[in-house]
Amino acid sequence: MDLFRRLFTQSPSKPQDKPAVSDSSRPKETAPMEPPSARTAEPSPGTPPAVETVAPTVADGATRPLPPETVISTSNEHLSFGQSTDVGMVRTTNQDTAYSMFSTSRSADQRPDFGLFIVADGMGGHHDGEKASAMAAHVVATHIATNVYLPMLRGENDADRMPITEAMISAVQKANTDIIAKVPEGGTTLTAVAIVGDLAYIVHVGDSRVYLITRDGLEQITRDHSLVQRLVELDQLTPEEAINHHQKNVLYRALGQSDTVEVDALTRRLPPKSRVMLCSDGLWNLVNEEEIAALVMQHNNPQEACDKLVALANTHGGTDNITAIILQIPG
């Protein structure tokens, strides 16, 4: 009888009779167990036969790795941009100002991407052109953030917030008032593009430009507020004559010139895979439109395209400050 007890009855103090439990002091990942052949040996004479060991199961509440086929991978395309500015080869100070801001999110709110991009070119004939351009960009960015971006972020209804175009026009007018009050000797151009989803809201004063560039070519969206452009529109100059005209840098509309300013405003829907470029006249005066379109479209990285354009303008003489911002639309 004692023999049968020893063969078929095991003592509860022996290790193999302990139930499998989760040890919270150990990492969730368990080390690989020894193969059965390493754990099962021939019993020596006089010892009970080994009991088959069952691999422990993952305790409730522990993290289980997902099978590979159930892991979901998603990629989202968003606007990308580059920005570059340079003093050029002739000037000693850079009176251009460039500003870029882009926000994207993914949540249940489904808010669209938002971006704001500004180029301001301080007028070279004024002592404080660099201060005027910096102030213009700062005031416009602050005003649009307060009246457009933050209300969108708070989820306010369209009816409860200022229309985007109205907010952008009032931002430029406020910048004009502040420049006259605080930088009376300063003047500047101002070109701003706000991106909401695939819509571009544009405001513009002066001769900095916005271009839309696609595989089909290049389109100048803004209109120069310059004396020579006005003469071209009146058929008193040809576009070719305007390029080398001695008054080509004279503006009839800019910030800081008078108490009131007329602001051009327009809205465009941006085609997929298109590019939008904001630039100062230091770029477009020295790099022709064919060169711009070819260089922008052959670079998938908009920062590389900006740097190449600025370098090309310097190669062509760099007679003015040079600024470029390029937006690459997903698609």
Image: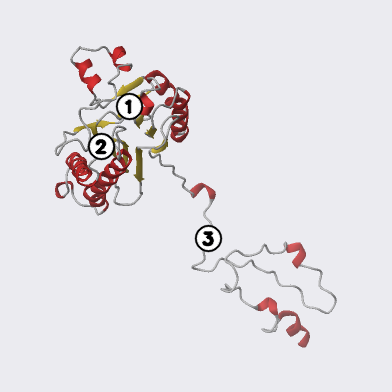
Visual colour scheme:
secondary structure
Q: How many marks?
A: 3
Q: Is residue 249 left or right of residue 15?
A: left
Residue 298 in view, yes or no: no
Position of residue 307 measured from the top left corner of the image (x, y, whole percent): 46, 32
In the image shown, does 152 or 286 lie closer to the viewer? 286
Disc 3: CA contacts within 10 A as few (<14), some (14-19) or many (>=20): few
Quadrant of the drawing holding the C terminus: top left
**Secondary structure under the numbered disc 2 in the rendered image:** loop
**In the figure, residue 131 lies in which quadrant?**
top left
Along the line of sight, the residue nearer the viewer: 241 or 29:
241
Q: Earlier in the sequence, mark 1 or mark 2?
A: 2
The image shows residue 214, relative to residue 255, as above or below, that is above
The one of 60 and 148 positioned closer to us in this rendering: 148
Q: Could you tell me which residue is drawn at 74 percent across and 72 percent down?
A: 50
- The mark closer to the camera, 1 or 3, is 1
Among numbered discs 3 and 2, the one appearing first in the sequence: 3
Q: Is residue 160 above or below residue 60?
A: above
* Residue with the mark numbered 2: 187
Question: Label 2 sits on what residue type?
Answer: Gly
Residue 199 rendering spot, x and y as whole percentages: 27, 35
- Real-space Cα separation, disc 3 to disc 2, in angstroms: 64 Å
Residue that carries the numbered disc 3 in the rendered image = 64
Q: Quadrant of residue 78?
A: top left
Is the residue under label 2 in contact with that under label 3 (CB below 8 Å)? no
Spatial CA distance of label 1 from label 3 is: 51 Å
